[in-house]
Amino acid sequence: MELCSPAFFIGSTIPFKYTCDGGNISPPLHWEDPPHGTNSFALILDDPDAPNQPFTHWVVYNLSDSTRELPEGITNQPTLPGGGVQGKNS
């Protein structure tokens, strides 16, 4: 399974607009080829390089098994419009 974003490349820094010092918005995400039998997805964005290591920036879970992307700028609401629940960050 591969998770990617058209907003940045593997090994590069996350663009300023997606940081807390920039626009503080979520980047667009896309994934393909989940394992057979997948019932739902959970995404956890951990930052191992944060000053107070580790820092969890974002948690979203209970995404439908048919979900393959999240758009840029997910709102800070407990549930997502297409399903899924946002957890608490660090």
Image: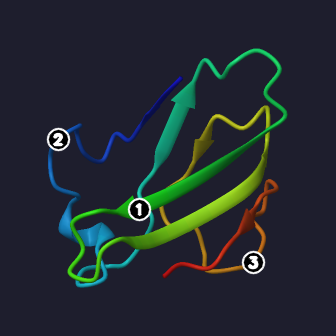
Q: CA distance from mark 2 to mark 1?
A: 15 Å
| Residue 3 percent across, percent down from the top left | 46, 34
Identify whether 60 is placed above or below 32: below
Which of the two labelled residues, at mark 3 and mark 1, occupies the earlier sequence position?
1
Horizontal placement of 76 versus 8: left or right?
A: right
Q: Position of residue 5 (x, y in %)?
A: 38, 41
Mark found first going from the N terminus, 2 or 1: 2
The residue drawn where x is 28% and y is 83% is 52
**Residue 46 tag number:** 1
Which of the 4 image quarters holds residue 50? bottom left
Q: Residues within 10 Å of mark 2 (few under 14, many from 20)?
A: few
Indicate the amino acid at tag 2.
Answer: Gly
Q: Position of residue 38 (x, y in %)?
A: 79, 27
> Cα distance, mark 3 to mark 1?
19 Å
Secondary structure under tag 2 reads: loop
Q: Nearer the viewer, mark 3 or mark 1?
A: 1
User: In the rendered image, which residue does mark 3 sit on?
Assistant: 78
Q: Give coordinates of residue 68: x percent, y percent.
A: 64, 34
Most distant residue in the left direction: 12
What is the quadrant of residue 24 in the picture? bottom left
The kind of residue on which mark 1 rests is Asp
Badge 1 crowding class, 10 Å Cα cut-off, few under 14, some 14 to 19, many 20 or more, is some
